[in-house]
Image: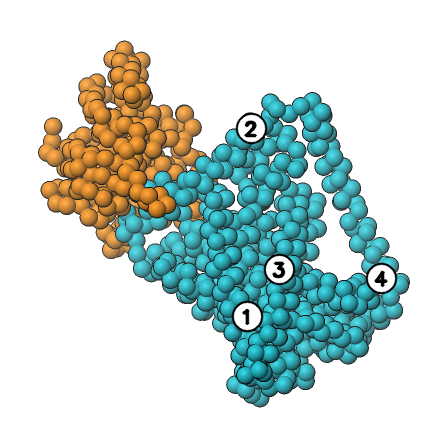
Chain colours: A orange, B cyan
Amino acid sequence: MGKVLLSVRNVSVDVKLGSKGIRILDNVTFDLREGEFLSIIGPSGCGKSTLLRVVAGLIRPSKGYVLFNGKPLLRPTPKITMVFQNFALFPWLTALENVELALINSVKSEELRRRKAREALRLVGLEGFEDALPRELSGGMKQRVGFARALVSEPDILLMDEPFSNLDALSAEHLRREVEVLVKREDIAPKAALMVSHNVEEVVQLSDRVLVFSGRPGKIIAQVDIDLPRPRSPRLPRFSKYVDELYSLLSY
Amino acid sequence: MKDLLGEVIITGLCLGYSLIRLTMGLIISILLSLAIGILAARNKSVERVIIPLLDVLQSVPILGFFPAVVYLFIYLNPYLGAELAAIVLIVTSQMWNLTFGVYEAIKTLPKDLLEVSEVLKLNLRYKILKLYCPVAIPKIASNIFPSWANGFFFLAASEIISLGNVKYELKGIGSRIVRLIANNDYMGLYIALTFSALLSVLLTELIFRPLLIWSEKYKLETIAKPMPVTEVWLGRLSLRRVRRIGRRIALKVPSFDLRRRVKVVYYPKLVKGFSSAFKVLVPVSLISFLMLLIIASKDFRDALMLLTELNYLKYTALALIYSTLRILATSLLTMCWIIPLAFYLYFRPKLERLTLLIFQVLASIPAPLFYPVILKVFKGSLIELGVILMLMLASQWYLFYNIYDGLKRFPYELEEVLNLYRVKGLYKLKVALVPAIMPSLFTGLVTFIGGCWNALVIAEELRPGVGVNIGIGKELISYTNAGYLPGLYATLLIMVLFIMGLNKGLWRPLRDYIMNRFSYEA
């Protein structure tokens, strides 16, 4: 196991609903290590997506803190990027321009930006679609642009907010396999990945470790290490065993 | 002292009369908008006829409706008729943006909700009550602001009907202000102005704003916001509410009894029959109506004769060019300050409430109040600037509300992407916010320009005989004052044709491009 990259300590998040405050995340603590693919799974409304946004620096926790490389994380950094559930692409920008957006602050030269963005699109298999607008792309292709945008700045941590849930089953399956390869590649892969999902099979296929959350307020109720050789086949009996284990944990 | 008290009482009474008229006008406008908007959005043949018609009607100056109201109402019954005529005129200044709002809301209804109601063969009444009306509520609530203000702005023109030797002046704050100005009664004017400002504040705070907040519940989010901050929870709740509506619709199915089912099954046939009848009926009835008018009315025949006179055509074409240039200049100037203002407010949401309140008060000042000031400041050839200012005062709010609304609808998820990659400042404007407002800027601009055509008659001649030398609004006023109906009809016809040409030749293609390039639906 690599060194600790990210530490989440006693994080709670309260939101205001009308005049009342509601706690949606309660006292969450965990570490993310180098080389690790960590997943968070839990029922809807358990604050998984919120936790991801706390780690991205988009939301300040009401209590607790997040350390990134040993320093407090207070705002978004180019070293932590995110893939969104609904792709979150700008409809009036081409695929290339959408990817370039991620480099606006870190890369000054426009030419270099363009080159890196092209390279990222090639990496996710979208060579030749640089000038396409999002509406001209299929769901799977849109999410590939989303991955290219998240990877182009060579982040240390890749966050994924239910990245396959808005795709049809076939595209999701395809993209999942590619992501499995991508995040374990030495040259371009981020140092660690953190994914939120409610798809148990997908979590078993991709993760090294899984945190199981309770319903609102979200709390860690279990932790499961997935010890399976890669690439993983869902047909293996050990695969199903993990799936069953997670399902039984979730049904509490 | 006794004088002052009397003044206050009279002003209050006049305000009361006007308030009743405006309220009736607004209620009628909303009901008509719902009926027309739903019909146009759900029936292709109706849509083809109604939408271009509305495009034109929203640009027809209030004077254009004078002959119709005079003939229809006042000749029938001078007392009640004049009141009804005033309400009809108020409706013509309030309803167009409401109708377009309803139309747009139903036109952009998510497919699945429509399909659910088709599959379940819901009857029309249920669809209207549980589907169409709820989704139209947010649009209506936000459009009430400019509608009410516009009604107030044109109030004087609605309360004083004068067509040749037919002259009606109804008791009301609009007509009173005109009289006070004519008498140079400044004390009276201050009181009237204070009263109408007070009324605007009260209405905005006690009715319009609460309505707007309540209407949030009925908002359909096109893109779900996964964020746990206050507004988003509201968003989620609203989405849940809509789903609940869907579920309620679904739950109704088993309870349909046989009789009802039979009726429901025949409904599509009815619609089909109706729409094919509509296709034939509308053009036929329009043409026969026109023929009848031409045969029956000497004025119409004279108008047609006038349209063949070269001198008249030359003069009107020149007037049209002048007015178009004025509107163009007004549009550019207005955009220069309204767009930055909308952005400023978007970045400072705390100022929203106060600013909207101030705008509502400013927008509700009746037009005649500006005349003395404008005539004093813009003398001689500067009067052109005065015209531009009047046009601006009349219509700029349409532009503002549209752009501001567009900014507020910027999807939260995209906002998150911008935050994540720390995209800020000019780049944020260029990449995200400016493209994002394009559709609403376009809609706002079209409504704004419609409003300008409308306002030409109050801007180009500020007082009888005082104003610009030539212009289409000026021409219409002079024909109206002289009671020369052929001139009024002919000029209106030319104006309508010109506006239709603009709509088809310029706005339609531009609209298609913008809606295609900049809409969120992917």
What residue is rendered at 35% in x and 46% in y? A19
Q: Identify which residue, B29 or B315, lies in the foreground.
A: B29
Residue type highlighted by circle 3:
Thr
In the picture of the structure, the residue carrying the numbered disc 4 is B293
Q: Identify which residue, A28 or A246, lies in the foreground.
A: A28
**Labels 3 and 2 within one chain:** yes
Q: How far apart are marks 2 and 1 (CA)?
A: 48 Å
Chain to which the residue tagged by mark 4 belongs: B
What residue is rendered at 36% in x and 25% in y? A173
Q: Which of marks 3 and 1 is nearer the N terminus?
A: 3
Residue type highlighted by circle 1:
Ser
Residue B474 at what x, y percent from top left? 68, 77
Q: What element carries label 2?
A: helix
Q: What element carries label 1?
A: helix
Callout 1 crowding tier (Cα within 10 Å): few <14, some 14–19, many ≥20: many
Q: Which of marks 2 and 1 is nearer the N terminus?
A: 1
Chain to which the residue tagged by mark 2 belongs: B
* Horizontal side, residue A220 vs residue B405: left or right: left
**Labels 4 and 3 within one chain:** yes
What residue is rendered at 24% in x and 31% in y? A219
In the picture of the structure, the residue carrying the numbered disc 1 is B196
In the picture of the structure, the residue carrying the numbered disc 2 is B250
Residue with the most extreme top position: A237
Name the image quarter holding the N terminus of chain A.
top left
Chain to which the residue tagged by mark 1 belongs: B
Chain to which the residue tagged by mark 3 belongs: B
In the picture of the structure, the residue carrying the numbered disc 3 is B23
Residue type highlighted by circle 2:
Ala
Foreground mark, 3 or 2, reads 3
Q: Is residue B361 above or below residue A103?
A: below
Residue with the most extreme front position: B2
